[in-house]
Image (cartoon, rainbow, N blue to C red):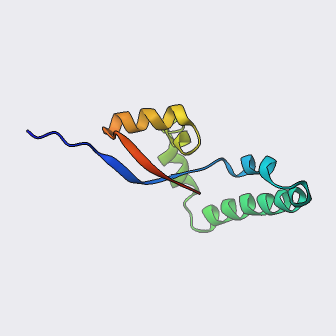
């Protein structure tokens, strides 16, 4: 069987939303805090409205660590190794 080198080009990586605060100019941090709180509330409301909160919670069970791969380098490398991917092109979110 032929061997193939797999490079992924479908990767998005970023920080948890609150992690961007320290990179903002101080003059924008208060607005960020307000917007971030609204985003969290809107996400929770959407989960409830579309009745997906329980589905999301159930889907995440047992995958909590793997889901950190967008911002946790060690977990990302483990995921790539598990999938047999040699490298990837990363697009920042």
Q: Which image quarter is the N terminus in?
A: top left
Residue 78 found in image quarter: top left
Q: Position of residue 17 (x, y in %)?
A: 70, 52
Residue at image point 52% right, 41% down: 69
Residue at image point 90% right, 54% down: 26
Along the line of sight, which residue is nearer the eye, 25 or 56? 25
23 shown above or below 61: below
Can residue 62 be seen from the camera position used here? no
Q: Position of residue 50 (x, y in %)?
A: 57, 68
Q: Which image quarter is the C terminus in?
A: bottom right
Label count reads 0
Can residue 73 be seen from the camera position used here? yes
Along the line of sight, which residue is nearer the eye, 20 or 57? 20
87 shown above or below 47: above
Residue 52 found in image quarter: bottom right
Residue at image point 55% right, 48% down: 57
4 shown above or below 43: above
Q: Position of residue 32 (x, y in %)?
A: 82, 59
Q: Position of residue 72 (x, y in %)?
A: 57, 37
Left or right side of 83 for 37: right
Along the line of sight, which residue is nearer the eye, 36 or 47? 36
Residue at image point 54% right, 36% down: 73
């Amino acid at each position: 069987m032929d061997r193939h080198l797999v490079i992924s080009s479908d990767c998005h990586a970023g920080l948890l939303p609150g992690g961007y605060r320290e990179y903002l100019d101080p003059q924008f941090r208060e607005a960020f805090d307000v917007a971030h709180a609204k985003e969290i509330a809107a996400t929770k409301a959407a989960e409830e409205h579309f009745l997906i909160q329980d589905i999301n919670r159930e889907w995440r069970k047992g995958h909590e660590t793997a889901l950190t791969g967008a911002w946790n380098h060690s977990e990302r490398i483990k995921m790539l190794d598990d999938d047999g991917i040699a490298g990837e092109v990363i697009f920042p979110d």
